[in-house]
Amino acid sequence: MLRLPMVLCCCVWLCAPGWLHAGELTHAEQVRRLTRKESASMKPVRITGVVTYVRGQGAGLVVEDDTGGVMLEWPRIREDESADPSFQVGMKVEVTGRTITSPPTPRIHVQGFRVLGTAPLPAPVEMDLAALRVSELDGSSVQCEDVIRVARIEEDVTPSRLVLELGPASARLMVWISRWDEETRRLLVPGTTVRVRGVLMRWKTVNWLPLVPFVVVNQPDWVTIVEPAPEFGAVPRQPLPEVLPAAADDDFSETIRVGGVVNYADGDTVVIREKEDVLWIRPREAPALVPGDRVEAVGFPGLNGPRGELEDAVVRKTGRAILPPAERMEPEYFLQKEFLWKDGMRVRMKGTVTRGSTEPEGAPLQLLFGSRQIPLYFAERPEDRSLPVAGSIMEATGALEAGLNAHLLRVGRGEADYRLHLQGMEDLKLIQAGPWWTPLRIFAVVGGAAVVAAGAGGWALFLKRRVAEKSRALVHEIAARREQEIVFQERRRLAADLHDTLEQTLTGASLQLEAVGTAEAPRPLALARRLLDRSRDELRRAVWDLTPEVIEERGLAEALEVIAGEQSELGVAVDVTASGDASQVPDRISAHLCRVAQEAISNAVRHGHAERVEVFLMVAEGEVEMVIADDGLGFDIRQAPGISTGHFGINGMKERLRRLGGLLEIRSQPGEGTSIRACCPIASLETVEGNV
C-alpha cells in the first residue's frame, strides 16, 4: 500500500516544470497574433531570442526569435529612468513577463530578463516598399532599397531621431534612425539611393486595425548609400507631359527636371505652364514666386488621383516671362466638359461672390458661376475687412483646379470638384458692387438700434426717478416756505398786538410814575420804576425778535447799523464794520445774531459802562462771524452771574448760537473791556428752522 503514494509523488515531481509553465506564450508570433482583448488579459510570456533593436538608452527593446520579433516594455521606477545602457544589439536573452496593449500594439511587460550570451543577428527579409506596406512581419528584420524623398530631424522625442521618408507621398515609408551624427545627416540627403536594414514595426488603432508601417534602425551603418543624390543641373530635363507616365510607373523612383512659367504659387503648391501643358508641383523648398516667374524644378513624379505631379521638389527661379492672358470661361463649358482640360490653366470667370469658410485653410469666398459655386482660394488669406461685399459681381482670375474625381467625369460617372486659386486680391475685379445691406450690417444696425433703445429706456427711467425726487423736494420746500410765511405773519400780528397794547400800557405807566416821582419818593416807587423800564426794554427786544422787518428788507449788516444807531442816541458810540456778502445769511440766522448783538451792547453799556463799542461782521466760505468789543470795565468770566442769580443774558446768547450749530466765545479781564465772538455756519432754511 505504501508504494502507490510514492509513485504518485514521483510523477508530480517529474511533471512539475511543465505544469508550472502551462499556458505561457513562448514565441513572438504568438504574441503578435493576439487580439486586443487577449493581449489586455496579461497573458504570461517566456521568450528566448536576440536583441535586434535598442532605442537609444530608453526602455524600448525588440527581441526576435525564429518566428519574428516583439517589442518589450521595460518597467520604470521613475518617469525619467532609462534601461541599463549595457543592452546591446546581438545579445541572446530570456525574457519573462506579461502581455500589455499600451500603446495599442502587442507588447511584453518585462518581469524577468536574463542575458544568455550573444548570437548572430537574424538575416533580414528583402522587400520592396509595396511589400513592406502589406507585410505582417511586425518586429522582424527587413531590408529594402529606395530613394530618400525627405530627410528631417524629430526633436520632440527623447532622444531625437533622424527620419528618412522613402517612396511616393501616397505610399510613403518612414525610417527612424535612433543613433546618428552630423556626418550621417550630411550624407543622407533627398535624392540619395539607400539600402536600409532595420526592424519593421506597425502600431495599431484602438480598434486593433494596423496602421502604416515604419522601419526602426539601430545604428547609422545599417543605412548604406547605393547612389548619391545627383546635382540639380545634372538631372535630365523632361517635357511636362512625361511626368504622368513616370508617376504611373510603380518602379520609377528617379528624379526628373522640368521647367516652365509660374501660373500660381503659394507655400505648398507651384503650378507651371509650358506651352499648352500644365504641371502641379509640391515643393520641398522654393523661393517666393509670383505668376510670370520662369522656374526649373527637380523632384519625383507622383500621382494625386488621376493627375501627375512633381513631389518633394526643389524649385529655382531662372528669370521672368510674359504671362499669357487668362482665358475667359463660360458656365456652359461645364456641360461640354471643357473644364477638365483646363486643370492648372489661368482662366477668368465672372459671377456673384458670397462669403465662404471662416476656417484658416478654407476658401474665404465663393463665386456663383452659372449654377455652380466655385471656391476661391488665395495664396495668402486676406483679411475679412478687405473682402468684397457679398452679392457683388466680380471677375476672378486664377489657376483652375479640377477635383481628384475628374477621371469619373471622363467616363461619364460623377462630377469634378472645381476650385479657383488666386494669387491675391488684385486678381479680383469689381464689376458691380453688392447691396449695402449685408446680413452682417443688418445685424450691426439692428444690434446698435437695440442698444440705443435700451440706453434711451434706461435714461428715461433715470430721468423719471430724478423728476420724482425733485418733485418731492420741491413740494417739501413749498410746504416749508408756506409754513414759514404763516409763522412770520403770526409773529407780525403778535408783535403788533404787543406794541399797540402792552407796550403802550407800560409806557403810559412809566410816564405816570415819572410824573409823580420826586427826589423824596419812597424807595419802592423807584424800584417799581426801574422794573417797569426793564420790562419795557425786554418787550421791545421781544417785538424786535418777532418783527425783523429791517432784516427782511435790508439784511443783517443794515440791521446791525439800526441797533448801533439806537444806542448812539443814548450817548454810546457804536461802530459797525461789515465784510463779505451778508445777503447770503438766512433771515433766521440774522435775527439770532441781531439779538446777540443787542444783548452784548446792552451789557457793555449797563454793566461795563463802556463809552465805545465796535461790531465786526465777516461773511466768507459758508460761515458768518460777528465780534462785539467794548472799552468797558470788563469782568472775571469765572465769577460772571448766571441763571441762579437771575441773569439770563450770557446763557441766552450761548443757547442761540448752540441752536444755530455755532459757537460763542467771551474774552474779558477786569479793567480791560470785553470781546464776544459769535460764529456759525450758513445753514439751509430747513436746518435753521429745525434748530430754532
Image: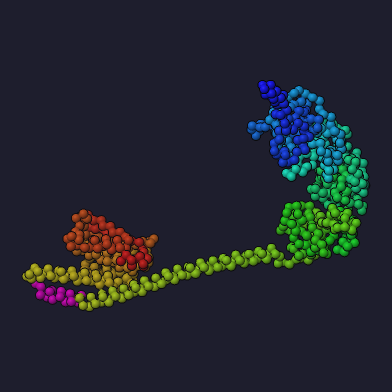
- Say if residue 474 shows up in the picture: yes
Residue 689 located within the stretch drawn in magenta = no
292 relative to 62, above or below: below
36 relative to 542, above or below: above
126 relative to 275, above or below: above
In x, y percent, where is residue 539?
Answer: 22, 71
In the displayed structure image, the side of residue 224 where residue 101 appears, left or right? left
- Residue 364 quadrant: bottom right
Residue at image coords 88%, 57%: 413
In the displayed structure image, the side of residue 605 where residue 561 appears, left or right? right
* Number of numbered callouts drawn: 0
- Residue 142 quadrant: top right
Residue at image coords 83%, 49%: 270
- List the single residue furthest toward the front: 1
Give the overall secondary structure of the magenta segment.
helix
- 633 or 125, which lies in front? 125
- 233 or 368, which lies in front? 368
- Say if residue 191 shows up in the picture: no
- Residue 34 quadrant: top right
Residue at image coords 62%, 65%: 448
**What is the magenta range?**
503-518
In x, y percent, where is residue 286?
Answer: 82, 45
Quadrant where the image shows the N terminus: top right
464 relative to 170, above or below: below
